[in-house]
Structures are given as structure tokens and as C-alpha cells.
Image (tube, helix red, strand yellow):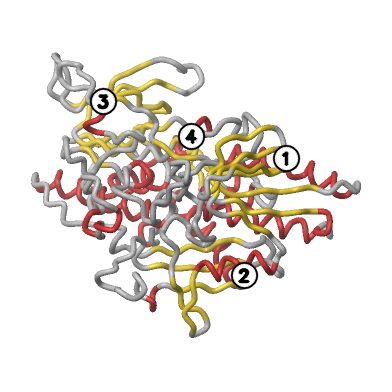
Amino acid sequence: MSRVVVLGAGIAGHTASAFLRKWLNKKHEVIVVSPSQYYQWIPSNIWVGVGKMSVDQVRFNVARLYKRWGISFYQARCVSIHPEGNEKTDKGFISIEYTEEGKKGNKEEIWYDFLVNATGPKLNFEATEGLGPENHTVSVCSYNHAEDAWKKLQVCFEKMKSGQKQTFIVGTGHPLATCQGAGFEYILNIDHEIRQRGLRHMAEIKWISNEYEVGDFGMGGAFIKKGGYITSTKIFTESFFIERDISWIKRAGVYKVEKNKIYYENLLGEFHEEYFDFAMLIPAFSGHGIHAFDKQNKDITPVLFAPNNLMKVDADYTGKPYEAWTINDWPSTYQSQAYPNIFAPGIAFAPPHAISKPMISKNGTAIFPSPPRTGMPSGVMGKIVAQNITEWIKTGKPTLKHRASMGKMGAACIVSAGYDFYKGNSATMTVSPIVPDWEKYPEWGRHLNNTIGEPGLAGHWLKLFMHYLFLHKAKGYPFWYLLPE
């Protein structure tokens, strides 16, 4: 009998635990540890943030689903990992602290044969002074944040109706933030909702980002095929802004937010301020600060984790110059180098380097996007980790023949540009591979036949369809396993 413990019930963790339970017979145990009892379909939080969906349309209770599946569920957070056991046992174990009402604060130890760290990111609002829902800006990174954002957005709508002009700023709230795509979606949806109300003349809308050029999206931008022509995501993105009279500030590292004021530094080393009435800025991401200890209870956190608290896996962390990196330096199995029975798919793993070229301001401040690993890539990683663990358990051999490198994996993304069945819009994009392969594709970095971008209403219908399709899959409805990641 083997026990697999999965930390996290997001896209990577939920995918991994679902397939583990499907492929392993019931003599093997699957345990999920997550601080929330809910799974959330994060891509649709954008629509919660503009009032087009309710919280309950983007989440469901995993505790009930896991009980039906035969997965043990602990509503708790992992505090520490003990991969060598302790003086009492050679079994690896984790220490958890309950977040469930009635048990909150209680601690417990859970042993494992295999551990999957799929905790996703910590929303590191505190890395930027004054950032976040507890301070002066809103967020759409979780369903409760998005619900709060919608409440505050409605206040701005009412002010505009009464004749008060409002300034909306959306983008990144830290010099090294990632997930520009979520901000891009949200600013387009805000613009759409304002126009639907006939209030666009009362609004100034601005984009602020750490990207060197808009459309970088943390992946160094891309060249895409559109209408038979080759163009850049810079032009593609700028066209969306120009058509909607949205201005932009690029190469900006936000370092402080006060009430109605954003402070940022640019790559020229200049310091500027921007006034706002409503701001949604994506925070920096980090790991959750889980500690690790060896058999003698010595702290070995740096062995398992990078300085940003994300887990080190089968990647090259030797610190090569940016120009020397290749796709072969990216992980493909998400297995810990230090402890082979530990894996970290999704955002939980530490990228070996930036995809976008690192940029430093004249003051020495790093201002550039960190690599994205959300959505489709996280699901694929979760599945291949489950495949490898399953075969290891069944055969007794760690063959790890299933691989999913971001240097070989493609990804599809539909960016919502306004929710409406007849007047909605979107930008449908695919890139392959996610990390550019300049050796294989020396001219463009990616396969142009598989790297495309198209705007239009049909993309909105497709994104809405995908919302229900992937929730169908996540809820374990009939034939869920046939649907793609």
C-alpha cells in the first residue's frame, strides 16, 4: 500500500489527485491537503470582478467530491516537510495546521510515500507597500477578491453617473510580477462594462506594467500568424488598447501604493506617480514559506526551495547568463533533485530563469515579468506527475517516462475582452512552445503554424463554453478524464 499526499486543490493539484485516484486501486491512499474547501476556476474570476458571474458559478466544494471519489481531504495548510522522517520513523511526513472551522490552529502529522507540492503561489501583496484588498487596490486573483473588486467597481460606476470622472488603472503591482494576461483581461472587461453603461466619456483607463513592451506577457512576447500575416503580440495588444482609447505605461516597477496614488520607477531610473480612483494590480508571486527539516531536525529549507520559496525541481539552477539558457534547462518531470519522491507541478516549482529578458533600471532595480505557469500548463504538469507516480507505484520502478517541458509544450489562452453573448469580444491566442526554442526556430523562436492570435466574438463564445467544460471536468462528471487539460 502506498500513500500519495497532494498539497493544494488548484488546477495542478486537483488534476493530479483526480488522475491518481482514477489510476490507482483503492488499496493505495490519496490524500489532499488544502487550506480552502473550494476549488475555483480561476480564469473566470475576471467575470466575477465585473459582475457577470457569481462566486458560486466559479467554485465548488471539493470536500464532498473527494469523499465521493475516495480521497481523504484535510482542510489545512502545510507548515513543514520532513522528507527523511525523524528519530521515530524513516517515513517522510508533513506537518499541517488546520484552517477548518472548529479545528483551526490544531496541528497534525501525515506520513507519505510520495508528495506532490501543488500549492500554487502565495499572493505576495506585502512585497509592495500599500498593495492589495487589505490596503488600497483590488485583486481578481481569487473569487473573494474578485467579488470585492466588483463591489468597488460599482461605486465608481455610480460616481460616473452622478458626473464625477473616474480614473481606472490596471496592471502589475510589483517590478517582478507575472500574470499580465489576467490584468489585460480585466482592463478590457472594465472598458466593456463602462461602454455598456454609456459612461466611457467619464472614464480615463490606463494600463501599467513591468513589461518592456506591452504584449510581453512574461514569455518574451511572441510573433503570431494573424490573417495570413506575421505580427508581434506587441502590435496585437496595442491595437486592443488603441481601439478602446486605453493608454499605457510600460517598463514600470510599482514599489508603493497610497490611497488614490501609485508610485513607480521606470527603467530610466525615473520616479513617477499616478492618481487613480480604482486600481487592480497583480501582486508578486512567491512560495508559501513551507520549511523543510532533515532526520536530525536540521533546517534544510534551502535544499528543497529557492529563495522565493518555490520548490526546486529537475531544472538547471546554476545561474547561467540569460543568453546561455536553452529549453533543456527547463524541468520536464517536476521531480525534486534532492528527494525523488517529491514533485512540484504548476506554479509551485521555481523557474530556472526568466523567459522575458531581465532588465535593470539605472538605479539597479530589476523590472521585468516573471515566467507564467498558469492554466493549461499547470493542468498538463499535474497529469504527467500523476502518471509517473502511478507507474512508479505499480511497477516499483521510477521510469518517469512522461514529460512536459514548457520548452516543448504549447499553450492556448482566450483573453476575454468583454462579456456579452452578442457584443462580447476576446483575443484567442496559442503559442508553441511556451518557452521559445531559438535553436529549433531561429527566426521566430516558436512554430508559427501553432502560434496564432485572432480577436472576435466567437472567441467569447468559446471561452464561455470552456468555463462550463472545465468545471464539468473538475467536478468529475461523466467522461471527465477524456477532456483535455
Question: Mark 2 sits on what residue?
Answer: 239
Image location (x, y in percent) of residue 286: 41, 37
Q: Is residue 246 left or right of residue 471?
A: right
Residue 292's disc number? 3
Q: Amino acid at mark 3?
A: Ala
Callout 1: few (<14), some (14-19), or many (20+) C-alpha neighbours within 10 Å? few
Question: Does label 1 or label 4 sit earlier along the sequence?
Answer: 4
Image location (x, y in percent) of residue 445: 34, 70
Q: Please state, as top left, top right, bottom left or bottom right, where the C terminus lies in the image.
A: bottom left
Q: Residue at x 35, y 27 (%)?
A: 78
Q: Secondary structure at mark 1?
A: helix
Note whether residue 355 is visible.
Answer: yes
Q: Residue at x 83, y 49 (%)?
A: 165
Question: Does label 1 or label 2 sit earlier along the sequence?
Answer: 1
Residue 54's disc number? none
Callout 3: few (<14), some (14-19), or many (20+) C-alpha neighbours within 10 Å? many
Q: CA distance from mark 4 to mark 2?
A: 31 Å
Question: Does label 4 or label 3 sit earlier along the sequence?
Answer: 4
Q: Nearer the viewer, mark 2 or mark 3?
A: 2
Q: Secondary structure at mark 2?
A: helix
Q: Amino acid at mark 1?
A: Lys
Q: Is residue 391 left or right of residue 190?
A: left
Residues at discs 1 and 2 in contact (Cβ within 8 Å) = no
Residue 151's disc number? 1
Question: Does label 1 or label 3 sit earlier along the sequence?
Answer: 1
Q: Amino acid at mark 4?
A: Asn
Q: Nearer the viewer, mark 4 or mark 2?
A: 2
Question: Does label 4 or label 2 sit earlier along the sequence?
Answer: 4
Note whether residue 141 is visible.
Answer: no
